[in-house]
Amino acid sequence: MNNISLIGCGRWGTFLGWYAANYGKADQVWMYDIPTSPNFLELKNTRKNSYLSLSDNMILFDNLTKILENDFIIISVGCQYFRGLCKELAPHNLKGKTFLLAMKGLEEPSGDRMLEIMRAEISQDIHIATLGGPGHVQDYMKGVPSAAVVDSDEEQTKDFVVKLMSSSLIRLYYGDDLIGNQIGAAMKNVIGLAAGILDGLEWYGLKGALMARAPIEVGRLIKHFGGNPMTAYGLSHLGDYEATLFSKNSHNRMFGEKFARGEDFGKLAEGVPTLKAVKNLADKYHIDMPISQALYQAIYEKGNIKEIINGLFERTLKREFEHLKRN
């Protein structure tokens, strides 16, 4: 029997479990979350959430040891809780198991990527892949197809995950820049905050400029850590802009819109702690990231949003593709 496991029963995690059970090649999907988690309790009591109903081959467990019996495990938890989860996983026998990390963010304040954290906390011989790219649960449940990218530092692991999880609903591509795809996926949430702020101000005309300039900034961060800056124009980042910068289902965009209007969003927006991590990295390594710096001033330092955005226009004038000449 080809059973797989899922850790994390939030909106995205539960969908990935449902997807693996209904579109992937899993016979059963074993799902785990903290037993007192509201998401887990809702699924346990009703076998559904606001987006989907669990299929018969999806089984809920409140025992982490049981979940780790399977050889393929999807993880979808908040990025800021991932290190703690890895510490819980480390004492178990994980040798030879494959993990798919479905989170999109950077740890705050360290700026560490999720794969870095797992390698640092778990010294066993495990295989790790990452998932990035567009898609909302609401759209997928309507049968709207999309694409995503799987990356790993092991070609065999990448190939295994792509073949196991690709379908007519989600076309999976093989990534070739593990660093860039992780950073790009994390940064699309940050840029989503900026898009939401523009929506909240009703400065819609600037979203095109944001889309054109943000990948350049993200590319600088990717390049600093040894990735290919052109990855910012791939599925993990630019390819996710429609879902993150425009969709009403984007938590990050909605957080920014509510923030600009002085309202509380009240839900997790992964871009907010990631923004703090990015600010720390930009300051530490002297990386030119004006959009991220402006966002930090607005969200964390409570600066005047309109003045901050206008300040971006007062920066030294330059040619549009000046960065290409430097490279």
Image (tube, rainbow, N blue to C red):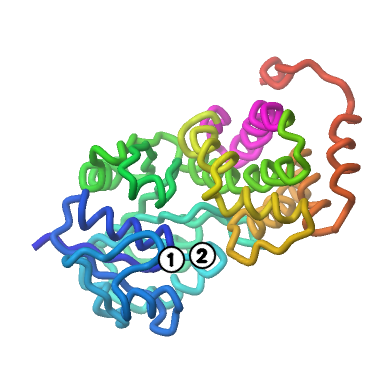
Asked if the residue under mark 2 is in contact with the one under mark 1, i.e. CB atoms within 8 Å, the reply is yes
* Residue 217 in the image, given as x and y percentages of width and height: 68, 34
Res 277 → quadrant = bottom right
Q: How many labels does the image show?
A: 2
Query: What residue range appears in magenta?
Result: 207-232
Q: Kindly report the distance in space between the C-alpha atoms of the residues bearing marks 1 and 2.
A: 9 Å
**In the image shown, does 243 or 5 lie closer to the viewer?**
243
1 or 2: tag closer to the N-terminus: 1
Q: Which residue carries the number 1 mark? A: 10
* Residue 291 in the image, given as x and y percentages of width and height: 75, 40
Q: Residue at the location (31% across, 40% down)?
A: 170
* Residue 9 in the image, given as x and y percentages of width and height: 39, 68
Side of 271 relative to 100 (left or right): right
Disc 2 crowd rating (10 Å Cα; few below 14, some 14-19, many 20+) is some
Q: Quadrant of the C terminus?
A: top right
**In the image shown, does 200 or 232 lie closer to the viewer?**
200
* Residue 289 in the image, given as x and y percentages of width and height: 74, 39
Amino acid type at image mark 1? Gly
Position of 277 relative to 162 (above/below):
below
Amino acid type at image mark 2? Gly
Q: Which mark is residue 78?
A: 2
Side of 264 relative to 186 (left or right): right
Farthest left residue?
1
